[in-house]
Amino acid sequence: MAKPSSVVCVAVRRSVAALALAALSLVAAPAHAWSNHALCTWPALAALPEFTALPPAPAESLASFLKAEASGLQKLLDDEEAWAQRHVPNYPARPAALAFRADPSLSADELQRRFIAALRINPASKLPLFLQLRPGQGGAGRAALTEADVTPLKTKESSKFDAFVALREGEPVPVIDIVASATDEPDYGLDIGIWSDNGTPHGAAYGFGKQPFGNPKVEFSSQAPMHIGFFHESAIVYKAAPFLGRTFPEYRVHLWRSLAAYALKTGHPYWGWRFAGWALHYLQDLTQPYHARVLPGISTARMLGINTLDIVGVKGPKERAITFVSNRHFALENYQLRWLRAAHLSGRDDDLAFRALRDTALDAGAPYRDDSPRQAIAKASHEASDATDAAVVAALPPKYTSDPDYTFGVTETGLDLRAELAKASPAAVAPMEQALLPLLRQFGLHTRSFVRGLLAAR
Ligand SMILES: [Zn+2]
Protein backbone atom coordinates (compact mmCIF):
# COMPACT_ATOMS: atom_id res chain seq x y z
CA MET A 1 0.00 0.00 0.00
CA ALA A 2 1.38 3.39 -0.90
CA LYS A 3 2.11 5.82 1.85
CA PRO A 4 -0.27 8.79 2.00
CA SER A 5 2.44 11.20 0.78
CA SER A 6 3.11 9.20 -2.38
CA VAL A 7 -0.60 8.92 -3.01
CA VAL A 8 -0.73 12.68 -2.99
CA CYS A 9 2.29 12.86 -5.36
CA VAL A 10 0.65 10.55 -7.85
CA ALA A 11 -2.50 12.55 -7.40
CA VAL A 12 -0.76 15.82 -8.18
CA ARG A 13 0.64 14.37 -11.40
CA ARG A 14 -2.67 12.92 -12.34
CA SER A 15 -4.69 15.94 -11.33
CA VAL A 16 -4.02 17.41 -14.71
CA ALA A 17 -5.81 14.59 -16.45
CA ALA A 18 -8.61 14.91 -13.98
CA LEU A 19 -9.26 18.45 -15.07
CA ALA A 20 -11.00 16.76 -17.94
CA LEU A 21 -13.52 15.42 -15.50
CA ALA A 22 -14.17 18.83 -14.03
CA ALA A 23 -14.85 20.36 -17.38
CA LEU A 24 -16.76 17.33 -18.54
CA SER A 25 -19.25 17.68 -15.74
CA LEU A 26 -19.29 21.43 -16.04
CA VAL A 27 -20.31 21.74 -19.65
CA ALA A 28 -22.65 18.77 -19.68
CA ALA A 29 -25.39 21.27 -18.90
CA PRO A 30 -27.40 22.88 -21.71
CA ALA A 31 -25.13 25.14 -23.71
CA HIS A 32 -27.07 28.35 -24.02
CA ALA A 33 -25.28 31.57 -23.35
CA TRP A 34 -28.13 33.97 -23.80
CA SER A 35 -31.55 32.35 -23.71
CA ASN A 36 -33.02 34.38 -26.53
CA HIS A 37 -30.53 36.28 -28.68
CA ALA A 38 -33.16 38.09 -30.71
CA LEU A 39 -34.43 40.05 -27.69
CA CYS A 40 -30.99 41.69 -27.36
CA THR A 41 -30.22 41.97 -31.08
CA TRP A 42 -33.20 44.21 -31.83
CA PRO A 43 -32.16 47.03 -29.47
CA ALA A 44 -28.44 46.58 -30.24
CA LEU A 45 -28.96 47.14 -33.97
CA ALA A 46 -31.59 49.84 -33.55
CA ALA A 47 -28.62 52.09 -32.67
CA LEU A 48 -26.96 51.62 -36.08
CA PRO A 49 -28.59 54.14 -38.47
CA GLU A 50 -26.82 52.87 -41.60
CA PHE A 51 -28.34 49.47 -40.87
CA THR A 52 -31.86 50.53 -39.92
CA ALA A 53 -32.05 52.60 -43.13
CA LEU A 54 -31.71 49.47 -45.32
CA PRO A 55 -34.75 48.64 -47.46
CA PRO A 56 -36.72 45.46 -46.64
CA ALA A 57 -35.32 42.30 -48.27
CA PRO A 58 -37.48 39.82 -50.18
CA ALA A 59 -37.68 36.43 -48.44
CA GLU A 60 -35.90 33.76 -50.47
CA SER A 61 -35.90 30.01 -49.87
CA LEU A 62 -32.58 28.27 -49.44
CA ALA A 63 -33.35 26.21 -52.55
CA SER A 64 -33.70 29.37 -54.70
CA PHE A 65 -30.48 30.82 -53.30
CA LEU A 66 -28.55 27.61 -53.99
CA LYS A 67 -29.95 27.23 -57.50
CA ALA A 68 -28.84 30.75 -58.39
CA GLU A 69 -25.42 30.66 -56.75
CA ALA A 70 -24.19 27.05 -56.76
CA SER A 71 -20.98 27.60 -58.71
CA GLY A 72 -19.96 30.71 -56.73
CA LEU A 73 -20.65 28.84 -53.51
CA GLN A 74 -18.43 25.94 -54.59
CA LYS A 75 -15.43 28.29 -54.75
CA LEU A 76 -16.40 30.17 -51.61
CA LEU A 77 -16.65 26.97 -49.55
CA ASP A 78 -13.31 25.70 -50.88
CA ASP A 79 -11.70 29.03 -49.91
CA GLU A 80 -13.38 28.87 -46.56
CA GLU A 81 -12.00 25.41 -45.83
CA ALA A 82 -8.50 26.64 -46.71
CA TRP A 83 -8.94 29.63 -44.39
CA ALA A 84 -10.08 27.46 -41.49
CA GLN A 85 -7.17 25.06 -41.94
CA ARG A 86 -4.74 27.98 -41.79
CA HIS A 87 -6.29 30.01 -39.01
CA VAL A 88 -8.38 27.94 -36.61
CA PRO A 89 -6.26 26.18 -33.95
CA ASN A 90 -6.87 22.41 -33.78
CA TYR A 91 -9.30 22.69 -36.70
CA PRO A 92 -10.70 19.30 -37.78
CA ALA A 93 -10.47 19.44 -41.58
CA ARG A 94 -13.59 18.81 -43.62
CA PRO A 95 -13.41 15.39 -45.31
CA ALA A 96 -12.83 15.86 -49.06
CA ALA A 97 -15.97 13.87 -49.87
CA LEU A 98 -18.07 16.62 -48.26
CA ALA A 99 -16.75 19.40 -50.51
CA PHE A 100 -19.63 21.21 -52.24
CA ARG A 101 -19.72 20.60 -55.99
CA ALA A 102 -22.11 22.59 -58.19
CA ASP A 103 -23.44 20.03 -60.61
CA PRO A 104 -26.25 21.45 -62.79
CA SER A 105 -27.85 18.01 -63.13
CA LEU A 106 -28.62 17.82 -59.39
CA SER A 107 -32.16 18.20 -58.08
CA ALA A 108 -32.90 21.11 -55.73
CA ASP A 109 -33.19 18.67 -52.81
CA GLU A 110 -29.85 17.04 -53.57
CA LEU A 111 -28.15 20.42 -53.95
CA GLN A 112 -29.46 21.47 -50.54
CA ARG A 113 -28.44 18.15 -48.98
CA ARG A 114 -24.90 18.58 -50.27
CA PHE A 115 -24.72 22.21 -49.15
CA ILE A 116 -25.75 21.25 -45.61
CA ALA A 117 -23.18 18.43 -45.57
CA ALA A 118 -20.44 20.84 -46.74
CA LEU A 119 -21.40 23.20 -43.90
CA ARG A 120 -21.35 20.26 -41.49
CA ILE A 121 -24.56 21.27 -39.75
CA ASN A 122 -27.31 18.98 -38.49
CA PRO A 123 -29.15 17.69 -41.60
CA ALA A 124 -32.40 17.66 -39.59
CA SER A 125 -32.21 21.48 -39.29
CA LYS A 126 -35.55 22.90 -40.43
CA LEU A 127 -34.32 26.15 -42.05
CA PRO A 128 -37.81 27.41 -42.89
CA LEU A 129 -38.64 30.93 -44.05
CA PHE A 130 -39.62 32.32 -40.67
CA LEU A 131 -39.52 35.22 -38.26
CA GLN A 132 -39.50 35.37 -34.51
CA LEU A 133 -41.91 38.06 -33.34
CA ARG A 134 -40.97 40.54 -30.64
CA PRO A 135 -42.85 39.99 -27.37
CA GLY A 136 -46.28 41.51 -27.82
CA GLN A 137 -45.86 41.99 -31.57
CA GLY A 138 -48.63 40.70 -33.84
CA GLY A 139 -47.92 38.43 -36.80
CA ALA A 140 -49.45 40.81 -39.39
CA GLY A 141 -51.64 38.03 -40.76
CA ARG A 142 -48.76 35.61 -41.31
CA ALA A 143 -49.31 31.92 -40.54
CA ALA A 144 -48.12 30.85 -37.09
CA LEU A 145 -45.39 28.21 -36.87
CA THR A 146 -44.92 25.85 -33.96
CA GLU A 147 -41.57 25.21 -32.32
CA ALA A 148 -41.47 21.87 -34.18
CA ASP A 149 -41.66 23.73 -37.51
CA VAL A 150 -38.48 25.62 -36.62
CA THR A 151 -36.34 23.16 -34.64
CA PRO A 152 -35.80 19.39 -34.61
CA LEU A 153 -34.77 19.53 -30.94
CA LYS A 154 -36.58 17.11 -28.72
CA THR A 155 -35.64 19.00 -25.58
CA LYS A 156 -38.32 21.69 -25.43
CA GLU A 157 -37.49 24.90 -23.72
CA SER A 158 -40.42 25.86 -21.60
CA SER A 159 -38.61 29.02 -20.54
CA LYS A 160 -38.75 30.40 -24.06
CA PHE A 161 -41.55 32.60 -25.21
CA ASP A 162 -40.83 32.51 -28.88
CA ALA A 163 -43.55 33.26 -31.35
CA PHE A 164 -42.73 32.12 -34.84
CA VAL A 165 -44.50 33.03 -38.08
CA ALA A 166 -43.96 31.83 -41.64
CA LEU A 167 -42.70 34.09 -44.41
CA ARG A 168 -43.83 33.71 -48.02
CA GLU A 169 -41.18 33.60 -50.73
CA GLY A 170 -40.71 37.08 -52.17
CA GLU A 171 -42.39 38.85 -49.25
CA PRO A 172 -40.46 42.01 -48.23
CA VAL A 173 -39.08 41.66 -44.70
CA PRO A 174 -37.48 44.33 -42.48
CA VAL A 175 -33.78 43.52 -42.37
CA ILE A 176 -33.55 44.00 -38.59
CA ASP A 177 -36.21 41.28 -38.12
CA ILE A 178 -34.32 38.87 -40.40
CA VAL A 179 -31.08 39.37 -38.47
CA ALA A 180 -32.66 39.30 -35.01
CA SER A 181 -34.59 36.09 -35.76
CA ALA A 182 -31.47 34.49 -37.22
CA THR A 183 -29.35 35.35 -34.17
CA ASP A 184 -31.38 32.85 -32.16
CA GLU A 185 -31.39 30.17 -34.86
CA PRO A 186 -28.08 28.38 -34.14
CA ASP A 187 -29.67 27.27 -30.86
CA TYR A 188 -32.41 25.47 -32.81
CA GLY A 189 -30.26 22.41 -33.43
CA LEU A 190 -27.80 23.46 -36.16
CA ASP A 191 -24.81 22.09 -34.24
CA ILE A 192 -26.45 19.05 -32.68
CA GLY A 193 -25.17 15.50 -33.16
CA ILE A 194 -22.15 16.54 -35.24
CA TRP A 195 -19.45 14.58 -33.34
CA SER A 196 -18.34 11.06 -34.12
CA ASP A 197 -19.54 9.69 -30.76
CA ASN A 198 -23.04 11.21 -30.91
CA GLY A 199 -24.46 8.10 -32.59
CA THR A 200 -25.73 9.98 -35.66
CA PRO A 201 -24.94 9.26 -39.35
CA HIS A 202 -23.85 12.86 -39.89
CA GLY A 203 -21.63 12.82 -36.80
CA ALA A 204 -19.92 9.75 -38.22
CA ALA A 205 -19.35 11.49 -41.58
CA TYR A 206 -18.40 15.05 -40.60
CA GLY A 207 -14.84 14.46 -39.44
CA PHE A 208 -15.05 16.60 -36.30
CA GLY A 209 -13.83 13.74 -34.09
CA LYS A 210 -15.18 12.92 -30.64
CA GLN A 211 -17.16 15.49 -28.72
CA PRO A 212 -14.47 17.42 -26.82
CA PHE A 213 -16.47 17.71 -23.58
CA GLY A 214 -19.97 17.33 -22.23
CA ASN A 215 -22.02 14.17 -22.28
CA PRO A 216 -22.25 12.96 -25.91
CA LYS A 217 -25.53 11.21 -25.07
CA VAL A 218 -27.27 14.43 -23.99
CA GLU A 219 -28.86 16.00 -27.05
CA PHE A 220 -28.11 19.63 -26.32
CA SER A 221 -24.59 19.26 -24.98
CA SER A 222 -23.20 18.41 -28.42
CA GLN A 223 -23.50 22.01 -29.58
CA ALA A 224 -21.40 23.41 -26.73
CA PRO A 225 -17.92 23.18 -28.32
CA MET A 226 -19.14 25.32 -31.24
CA HIS A 227 -20.78 27.92 -28.96
CA ILE A 228 -18.07 28.27 -26.35
CA GLY A 229 -14.58 29.79 -26.64
CA PHE A 230 -12.16 28.55 -23.99
CA PHE A 231 -9.35 30.59 -25.53
CA HIS A 232 -7.69 32.22 -22.52
CA GLU A 233 -7.10 29.56 -19.87
CA SER A 234 -3.62 29.15 -18.37
CA ALA A 235 -1.16 27.07 -20.41
CA ILE A 236 -1.16 24.37 -17.73
CA VAL A 237 -4.90 23.93 -18.15
CA TYR A 238 -4.54 23.07 -21.86
CA LYS A 239 -1.64 20.82 -21.07
CA ALA A 240 -3.77 19.07 -18.52
CA ALA A 241 -6.90 18.92 -20.59
CA PRO A 242 -6.05 19.40 -24.30
CA PHE A 243 -9.67 18.89 -25.27
CA LEU A 244 -10.42 22.35 -23.85
CA GLY A 245 -8.52 23.72 -26.86
CA ARG A 246 -11.11 22.18 -29.17
CA THR A 247 -13.75 24.89 -29.22
CA PHE A 248 -14.61 26.20 -32.70
CA PRO A 249 -16.83 29.29 -32.73
CA GLU A 250 -14.17 31.01 -34.90
CA TYR A 251 -14.79 28.45 -37.65
CA ARG A 252 -18.54 28.95 -37.53
CA VAL A 253 -18.37 32.75 -37.38
CA HIS A 254 -16.01 33.02 -40.35
CA LEU A 255 -18.04 30.56 -42.42
CA TRP A 256 -21.34 32.37 -41.81
CA ARG A 257 -19.72 35.77 -42.31
CA SER A 258 -18.22 34.75 -45.66
CA LEU A 259 -21.57 33.37 -46.82
CA ALA A 260 -23.29 36.56 -45.64
CA ALA A 261 -20.86 38.81 -47.52
CA TYR A 262 -21.18 36.67 -50.64
CA ALA A 263 -24.99 36.67 -50.57
CA LEU A 264 -25.10 40.44 -50.05
CA LYS A 265 -22.72 41.03 -52.96
CA THR A 266 -24.63 38.77 -55.33
CA GLY A 267 -28.09 40.25 -54.73
CA HIS A 268 -29.50 37.86 -52.11
CA PRO A 269 -30.02 40.20 -49.14
CA TYR A 270 -32.37 37.84 -47.33
CA TRP A 271 -29.67 35.14 -47.05
CA GLY A 272 -27.02 37.79 -46.56
CA TRP A 273 -28.72 38.97 -43.40
CA ARG A 274 -29.78 35.53 -42.23
CA PHE A 275 -26.21 34.22 -42.41
CA ALA A 276 -25.10 37.43 -40.69
CA GLY A 277 -27.49 36.60 -37.85
CA TRP A 278 -26.00 33.12 -37.56
CA ALA A 279 -22.48 34.56 -37.30
CA LEU A 280 -23.65 37.04 -34.69
CA HIS A 281 -25.07 34.26 -32.54
CA TYR A 282 -21.62 32.80 -31.85
CA LEU A 283 -20.07 36.23 -31.25
CA GLN A 284 -22.86 37.04 -28.83
CA ASP A 285 -22.33 33.72 -27.02
CA LEU A 286 -18.73 34.78 -26.41
CA THR A 287 -19.88 37.96 -24.65
CA GLN A 288 -21.16 35.68 -21.86
CA PRO A 289 -18.30 35.13 -19.35
CA TYR A 290 -19.50 31.61 -18.55
CA HIS A 291 -18.92 30.79 -22.25
CA ALA A 292 -15.38 32.15 -22.28
CA ARG A 293 -13.90 30.62 -19.10
CA VAL A 294 -14.08 27.07 -17.76
CA LEU A 295 -14.61 27.97 -14.11
CA PRO A 296 -15.23 31.70 -13.51
CA GLY A 297 -14.38 32.78 -9.99
CA ILE A 298 -11.90 29.92 -9.49
CA SER A 299 -8.16 30.45 -10.01
CA THR A 300 -6.06 27.92 -11.90
CA ALA A 301 -4.23 26.97 -8.70
CA ARG A 302 -7.51 26.32 -6.92
CA MET A 303 -8.82 24.40 -9.90
CA LEU A 304 -5.80 22.09 -9.76
CA GLY A 305 -6.12 21.80 -5.99
CA ILE A 306 -9.77 20.85 -6.18
CA ASN A 307 -8.94 18.15 -8.70
CA THR A 308 -6.12 16.80 -6.63
CA LEU A 309 -8.49 16.44 -3.70
CA ASP A 310 -10.99 14.77 -6.00
CA ILE A 311 -8.43 12.18 -7.01
CA VAL A 312 -7.55 11.33 -3.42
CA GLY A 313 -11.23 10.79 -2.76
CA VAL A 314 -12.34 14.18 -1.46
CA LYS A 315 -15.11 14.74 -3.99
CA GLY A 316 -17.02 17.57 -2.34
CA PRO A 317 -14.98 20.61 -3.45
CA LYS A 318 -15.08 19.66 -7.13
CA GLU A 319 -18.76 18.84 -7.10
CA ARG A 320 -19.50 22.08 -5.28
CA ALA A 321 -17.44 24.17 -7.72
CA ILE A 322 -19.21 22.70 -10.72
CA THR A 323 -22.66 23.07 -9.18
CA PHE A 324 -22.01 26.68 -8.20
CA VAL A 325 -20.62 27.76 -11.57
CA SER A 326 -23.38 25.99 -13.44
CA ASN A 327 -26.13 27.47 -11.22
CA ARG A 328 -24.71 30.99 -11.52
CA HIS A 329 -24.53 30.62 -15.30
CA PHE A 330 -28.18 29.60 -15.47
CA ALA A 331 -29.25 32.24 -12.97
CA LEU A 332 -27.65 34.97 -15.09
CA GLU A 333 -29.45 33.72 -18.19
CA ASN A 334 -32.75 33.34 -16.40
CA TYR A 335 -32.62 36.91 -15.14
CA GLN A 336 -31.55 38.28 -18.53
CA LEU A 337 -34.35 36.50 -20.39
CA ARG A 338 -37.06 37.70 -17.99
CA TRP A 339 -35.68 41.22 -17.93
CA LEU A 340 -35.44 41.59 -21.70
CA ARG A 341 -38.86 40.10 -22.25
CA ALA A 342 -40.40 42.49 -19.70
CA ALA A 343 -38.56 45.43 -21.28
CA HIS A 344 -39.95 44.61 -24.73
CA LEU A 345 -43.48 44.17 -23.34
CA SER A 346 -43.33 47.43 -21.38
CA GLY A 347 -42.66 49.46 -24.53
CA ARG A 348 -40.33 51.61 -22.42
CA ASP A 349 -37.54 52.65 -24.69
CA ASP A 350 -35.51 53.98 -21.74
CA ASP A 351 -35.28 50.64 -19.94
CA LEU A 352 -31.73 50.24 -18.59
CA ALA A 353 -31.20 47.02 -20.57
CA PHE A 354 -32.12 48.73 -23.84
CA ARG A 355 -29.92 51.69 -23.01
CA ALA A 356 -26.93 49.40 -22.37
CA LEU A 357 -27.52 47.43 -25.57
CA ARG A 358 -27.80 50.68 -27.57
CA ASP A 359 -24.79 52.32 -25.90
CA THR A 360 -22.44 53.32 -28.74
CA ALA A 361 -19.83 55.04 -26.53
CA LEU A 362 -17.15 52.41 -27.29
CA ASP A 363 -18.13 51.56 -30.87
CA ALA A 364 -15.42 53.59 -32.58
CA GLY A 365 -12.64 51.67 -30.84
CA ALA A 366 -13.77 48.17 -31.82
CA PRO A 367 -13.66 47.56 -35.58
CA TYR A 368 -14.46 43.93 -36.38
CA ARG A 369 -11.59 41.70 -37.58
CA ASP A 370 -11.20 37.96 -38.14
CA ASP A 371 -9.42 37.61 -34.78
CA SER A 372 -12.04 39.61 -32.86
CA PRO A 373 -13.91 36.53 -31.55
CA ARG A 374 -10.76 35.36 -29.76
CA GLN A 375 -8.69 38.49 -29.14
CA ALA A 376 -11.42 41.00 -28.39
CA ILE A 377 -14.71 39.36 -27.42
CA ALA A 378 -13.74 36.16 -25.58
CA LYS A 379 -10.77 37.97 -24.04
CA ALA A 380 -12.94 40.71 -22.56
CA SER A 381 -15.39 38.09 -21.27
CA HIS A 382 -12.60 36.04 -19.75
CA GLU A 383 -11.22 39.13 -18.03
CA ALA A 384 -14.67 40.07 -16.75
CA SER A 385 -15.51 36.56 -15.56
CA ASP A 386 -14.35 36.84 -11.93
CA ALA A 387 -16.16 40.15 -11.46
CA THR A 388 -19.33 38.84 -13.08
CA ASP A 389 -19.28 35.73 -10.95
CA ALA A 390 -18.77 37.76 -7.77
CA ALA A 391 -21.51 40.21 -8.76
CA VAL A 392 -24.00 37.40 -9.38
CA VAL A 393 -23.19 35.88 -5.99
CA ALA A 394 -23.64 39.25 -4.29
CA ALA A 395 -26.88 40.03 -6.13
CA LEU A 396 -28.83 36.81 -5.56
CA PRO A 397 -30.05 34.89 -2.52
CA PRO A 398 -27.39 32.23 -1.69
CA LYS A 399 -29.78 29.42 -2.53
CA TYR A 400 -29.26 30.12 -6.25
CA THR A 401 -25.51 30.60 -6.22
CA SER A 402 -23.89 28.89 -3.25
CA ASP A 403 -26.03 25.93 -2.17
CA PRO A 404 -24.46 22.60 -3.20
CA ASP A 405 -27.84 20.87 -2.90
CA TYR A 406 -29.63 23.23 -5.28
CA THR A 407 -29.66 22.52 -9.04
CA PHE A 408 -30.89 25.47 -11.05
CA GLY A 409 -33.82 24.54 -13.28
CA VAL A 410 -34.23 21.17 -11.57
CA THR A 411 -34.79 21.83 -7.87
CA GLU A 412 -37.42 24.38 -8.91
CA THR A 413 -38.91 24.64 -12.39
CA GLY A 414 -40.52 27.61 -14.12
CA LEU A 415 -38.47 30.01 -12.03
CA ASP A 416 -38.65 33.74 -12.82
CA LEU A 417 -35.68 35.12 -10.95
CA ARG A 418 -36.58 38.72 -11.69
CA ALA A 419 -40.06 38.29 -10.20
CA GLU A 420 -38.54 36.46 -7.22
CA LEU A 421 -36.20 39.35 -6.46
CA ALA A 422 -38.83 42.03 -7.03
CA LYS A 423 -41.14 40.25 -4.57
CA ALA A 424 -38.80 41.20 -1.74
CA SER A 425 -38.61 44.83 -2.87
CA PRO A 426 -38.44 46.58 -6.24
CA ALA A 427 -34.92 47.79 -5.36
CA ALA A 428 -33.71 44.20 -4.91
CA VAL A 429 -33.29 43.82 -8.67
CA ALA A 430 -30.69 46.60 -8.92
CA PRO A 431 -27.51 44.58 -8.10
CA MET A 432 -28.43 41.88 -10.62
CA GLU A 433 -29.06 44.49 -13.27
CA GLN A 434 -25.72 46.13 -12.47
CA ALA A 435 -24.06 42.72 -12.96
CA LEU A 436 -25.66 42.36 -16.38
CA LEU A 437 -25.29 45.87 -17.76
CA PRO A 438 -21.58 45.63 -18.73
CA LEU A 439 -22.29 42.35 -20.50
CA LEU A 440 -25.19 43.86 -22.42
CA ARG A 441 -22.93 46.76 -23.45
CA GLN A 442 -20.44 44.23 -24.86
CA PHE A 443 -23.25 42.39 -26.62
CA GLY A 444 -24.42 45.60 -28.29
CA LEU A 445 -20.93 46.83 -29.10
CA HIS A 446 -19.78 43.64 -30.84
CA THR A 447 -23.10 43.08 -32.60
CA ARG A 448 -22.87 46.53 -34.19
CA SER A 449 -19.18 46.30 -35.01
CA PHE A 450 -19.75 43.03 -36.90
CA VAL A 451 -22.67 44.46 -38.87
CA ARG A 452 -20.81 47.70 -39.57
CA GLY A 453 -17.91 45.67 -41.00
CA LEU A 454 -20.24 43.64 -43.17
CA LEU A 455 -21.94 46.77 -44.52
CA ALA A 456 -18.53 48.22 -45.43
CA ALA A 457 -17.53 44.98 -47.21
CA ARG A 458 -20.54 44.94 -49.54
ZN1 LIG B 1 -25.32 29.41 -28.67
Image (cartoon, rainbow, N blue to C red):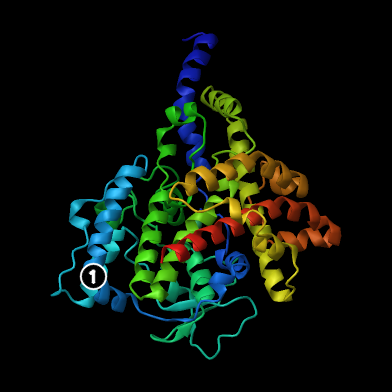
Classify mark 1: residues with Cα within 10 Å, few (<14), some (14-19) or many (20+).
some
User: Which residue is rendered at x = 77% and y = 49% of the image?
Assistant: 395
Task: Mark yes or no: residue 100 visible.
Answer: yes
User: Which residue is rendered at x = 75% and y = 52% of the image?
Assistant: 434
Residue 68 lies, with reference to residue 382, above or below; the image says: below
Toward the viewer: 291 or 251?
Answer: 251
Instruction: Tell me where residue 423 appears, x and y as whole percent.
Output: 82, 62
User: Which residue is rendered at x = 50% and y = 63% of the image?
Assistant: 451
Q: Quadrant of the C terminus?
A: bottom left
Please state which amino acid type lies under the numbered disc 1.
Answer: Ala
Instruction: Tell me where residue 47 appears, x and y as whole percent.
Output: 63, 67
Residue 134 lies, with reference to residue 331, above or below; the image says: below
Residue receiving disc 1: 70
Toward the viewer: 395 or 257?
Answer: 257
Residue 3 lies, with reference to residue 192, above or below; the image says: above
Instruction: Tell me where residue 209 appears, x and y as whole percent.
Output: 31, 45
Numbered disc 1: secondary structure: helix
Instruction: Tell me where residue 70 appears, x and y as whole percent.
Output: 23, 70
User: Which residue is rendered at x = 75% and y = 73% of the image?
Assistant: 348
Q: Is residue 27 left or right of residue 386?
A: left
Task: Mark yes or no: residue 209 visible.
Answer: no
Ligand 1 under 8 Å from disc 1 Cβ: no
* Residue 430 lies in quadrant: bottom right
Residue farthest toward the left in the current orientation of the protein: 105
Residue farthest toward the bottom in the current orientation of the protein: 141
